[in-house]
Amino acid sequence: MGKNRSILLYPFSLVYGAITAIRNFLYDTGILPSTEFRTPVICIGNITVGGTGKTPHTEYLVRLLGKHFRVATLSRGYKRETRDFRIASPASTVNEIGDEPLQISGKFPEIVVAVDRNRVQGVRKILKTDPSIQVVLLDDAYQHRRIRPGFSILLTDYERLIFNDSMLPYGNLRESASNIDRANIILITKSPADLSPIDRRIIVKEMNKEPGQNLYFTTVTYEEPVPVFAGDEDEKRSFESADINETTIVLLTGIANPLALKDHLRKYAGEIVHLSFPDHHNFSENDIEMVSKAYEDIKTASKFIFTSEKDAVRLREFTNIAEPFRSAFYYVPIGIEFLNDDREEFDNLILDYVRTNK
């Protein structure tokens, strides 16, 4: 947040805020046009830089909607090397479509996963390619005003709530916090599972949401570790039976906020050696050698390498990693849960929107 950055950046944040305010005014007044579609379009995004948990929430929506409708997802494919419209296939790579779309495509091969820098063009091409699509999920498109979604979901991290933040570059906001009024639903993500009713009421009040907006709290859930590469069951059993006090983990991450994952892994190991890289980092052969050296230097009886689910997508493209180093790699799948028994209400709002508009 801004308090950790130089005060010299504050004047630049005022300029940036003015530019985004003018841009939003031009779209709000219709001077700059926005495109709507007859097919239901749901936007999942945020107004801050850094991870707020968009991918697990998008996957939650895919599971929810996929039971009833033909679903497609569309994102720009951050840090991919291509620029054109692409639909994910089993042969797709990170460089072609990006890590998050590749992760979603691998987990949900039954849906259409597409990328396009131009979201309007992307939706049009999806519907032309597959007219059976009944709902399109726009990933990380809250600031993409050229398209007007029928329903918007805004995410804000519990540890970095938008009303405590400042505009870029002094803070982390991409636009003023007042623009939460474009959202139909606000989700406070990565909340403590034991969040008290008092703390919840304080946050709801400070968010200053509109009367017609719904606000819910979600928390991160961690599943059992999974081998990054195809491994045999004997190797997996050796991990599950390892003595925590005699186990060391090398944690390799290229995500915005790896601290929660690191804390979770303390249940598996007495020591964690963390190799942290920037979000969406393109791992190189030198990076893999660094991990290998850190792994070889461990002297405890048991040792493993862990990474995030998103990073695992990138690491799988290294086909030259040999045993036993290869079998030491694990990732932890993550999901979300709604607090306060709000899941059913949230689900019904989403399903009702699509049913009413499809």
Image (cartoon, rainbow, N blue to C red):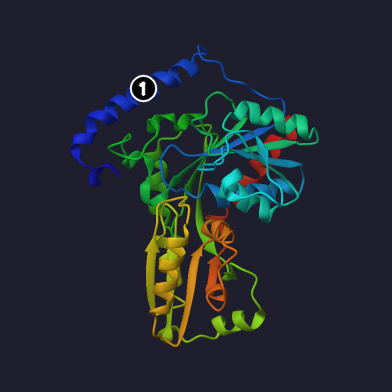
Going by the picture, which residue comes out furthest to the top? 31
Q: Position of residue 188 (x, y in %)?
A: 46, 47
Looking at the image, residue 241 lies above or below residue 62: below
Going by the picture, which residue comes out furthest to the right? 132
Looking at the image, residue 321 lies above or below residue 63: below
Q: How many marks?
A: 1
Residue that appears at 73% across and 47% down: 66
Residue that appears at 45% across and 76% down: 267
Q: Secondary structure at mark 1?
A: helix
- Nearest the eye: 63 or 292: 292
Quarter of the rendering occupied by the C terminus = top right
- Nearest the eye: 232 or 342: 232
Report whether residue 358 is seen. Answer: no
Q: Position of residue 22 (x, y in %)?
A: 39, 18
Q: Determine the image quadrant of residue 47.
A: top left
Report whether residue 152 is seen. Answer: yes
Looking at the image, residue 281 lies above or below residue 6: below
Looking at the image, residue 225 lies above or below residue 150: below
Residue that appears at 37% across and 51% down: 159
Q: Position of residue 222 (x, y in %)?
A: 54, 65
- Nearest the eye: 295 or 109: 295
Residue that appears at 32% across and 34% down: 167
Q: Is residue 282 left or right of residue 6?
A: right
Quarter of the rendering occupied by the N terminus = top left
Q: Determine the image quadrant of residue 238.
A: bottom right
Please give the residue where the numbered disc 1 appears in the rendered image: 19
Amino acid at circle 1:
Ile
